[in-house]
Amino acid sequence: MIDPTDAVTRSIPQPVRLDFASESRTYSIALDRDLFDQWSVTRSWAGKHNNLRGSRITHVDSFEAGLAMVHLLARRREKSGYHLRTPFAG
């Protein structure tokens, strides 16, 4: 059991996911652990009006390095005219 008053215990970082959309394309960024318990950033993109899609996985050294990469990619998407989609509240 984890003691919340323990000064040594750290919280486990949670996966991060951002979804962006433009008029004709979608773009997703996810920071998560892979099957080997290593952090990786997965980028996925697709056209809204065609079947063109792709993805790229980049392994990072730590959660913090991955989070910095996610922020950098998110800024690039916003500068390219993409808008952050709000999460679906179901």
Image (cartoon, helix red, strand yellow):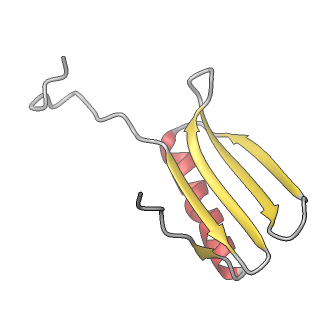
Task: State which quadrant residue 26 falls in.
Answer: bottom right
Give the residue displayed 63% in from the left and 77% down from the top.
78
The mark total stands at 0
Q: Residue furthest front?
A: 90
- Horizontal placement of 27 versus 88: left or right? right
The residue closer to the viewer here, 53 or 29, is 53
Q: Residue, x 90% and y 59% (percent of image)?
A: 51
Q: Position of residue 52 (x, y in %)?
A: 90, 59
> Which picture quadrant has residue 29?
bottom right
Residue 12: percent from left, percent from top: 36, 34
Position above or below: 67 against 71: above
Q: Please give the name of the residue rendered at 59% of the width and 36% of the height, measured from the top-left corner.
A: 61
Q: Position of residue 35 (x, y in %)?
A: 62, 22
Vertical arrangement, residue 14 with respect to residue 48, above or below: above
Q: Quadrant of the C terminus?
A: bottom left
Report the side of 46 relative to 9 (left or right). Answer: right
